[in-house]
Amino acid sequence: MRHFLEVDDLSRPELERVLDLASMAEPPRVLAGKGMALIFEKPSARTRNSMEMAVVQLGGHPVYIQADEVGLDTRESVEDVTNAMAGFHAAVGARVFEHSQVERMAAVDRVPVVNLLSDEGHPMQALADLLTMHREFGALEGRSVAYVGDANNVARSLAIGAALCGMTFRIASPGGYTFPDRDLDRIRQHAEPEVFDRPEDAIAGADAVYADTWTSMGQEAEAEQRRRDFEGFQVDERMMGYASAGAIFLHCLPAHRGEEVSDDVLDGAQSRIWVQAANRMHAARGLLAWLMGEVKS
Ligand code: CP
Ligand code: NVA
């Protein structure tokens, strides 16, 4: 039984296979007659829709479930919900506040579990990010991506995924918003990340520049403080000027225009945000096809 809670739950060859499967012209019907439960504790536009459509394209039926309906650890334990879902579905995906909840689902080990974003990681996003850069650049080995902002769930999964693919991962964050040692150790298992204080230094010569919100879901009470703390970390045209010629701009979205990124960068010629968002569906299809055992047949 395989689960996908973080990008490096896949080996590098497995990750490359998933990216290949994401681009298959005729998706295998590995979910024909089967379902996938998609449990959300937080809002979503891209993740819900990309997962649902990926399941449909593989011949299956997605069931969207608001976490309140099943009452994770209130109406029923996480383990009991997972056991029930395993009786109906070929896979379970969950977007949760606490990463331990997806770990507990995976520990039941009766159905593959996919992390649809937790406080620790957003591996489905990272798969789409890698697919986007792969389609843009070809081979990822030796390319660089510079992440500017909060060392959050999106940054962590991107760092792990980029390192796993032989890319250089660079990050610039204000003091207090950097990766904890635990995350750095995890990334270092694949490649040493390059950590900077100034965004200009992280961006210098990079092939891709990446931004995410300064205030993640669940941190809304800190938004004012964070706006102050992240001053000087907006990716604008001047910042993009430090990147390599032909560099692209990526953002997992939703974006907060005028905060972590300026309108002109988000809507400019270097931006790939809409193809990146669409790639969420293709990457999800690749991951689910692999998880359903296409690769082993
Ligand atoms: N990038 C992303 O996960 O978007 P949603 O929160 O809309 O799913
Ligand atoms: N870091 C953001 C990503 C949203 C897709 C959050 O967790 O809210």
Image (cartoon, grey):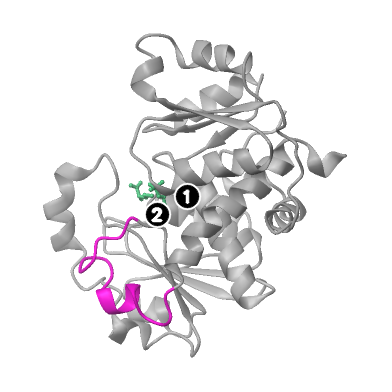
Quadrant where the C terminus sits is top right
Residue type (three-letter) at the residue carrying disc 1:
Asp
- The magenta segment: 254-271
Quadrant where the N terminus sits is top right
Report whether residue 287 is seen.
Answer: yes
- Confirm whether the magenta stretch covers residue 124: no
Whether the residue carrying mark 1 lies under 8 Å from ligand 2 is answered with no
* Image position of 267 with respect to 151: above or below: below
Report whether residue 159 is seen.
Answer: no
User: In this image, 33 relative to 260: left or right?
Assistant: right
The residue carrying mark 1 is 183
Location of residue 234 by image quarter? bottom left
How far is disc 2 from disc 1 in space, using C-alphas? 6 Å
Q: What residue is drawn where x is 73% and y is 43%?
A: 290
Q: Nearer the viewer, residue 171 or 270?
A: 270
Location of residue 203 by image quarter? bottom left
The residue carrying mark 2 is 179
Where residue 101 appears, x then y in whole percent? 46, 26
Q: Are marks 2 and 1 in contact (CB under 8 Å)?
A: yes
Q: What residue is drawn where x is 73% and y is 48%?
A: 27
Q: What residue is drawn where x is 66% and y is 19%?
A: 110
Q: Nearer the viewer, residue 79 or 135?
A: 135
- Confirm whether the magenta stretch covers residue 267: yes
Q: Nearer the viewer, residue 39 or 15?
A: 39
Q: Residues within 10 Å of mark 1 (few under 14, many from 20)?
A: some
| Most frequent secondary structure within the magenta stretch | loop
* Image position of 206 with respect to 132: above or below: below
User: In this image, 286 relative to 235: left or right?
Assistant: right
Where residue 70 appears, x then y in whole percent? 41, 16
**Label 2 residue SS:** loop
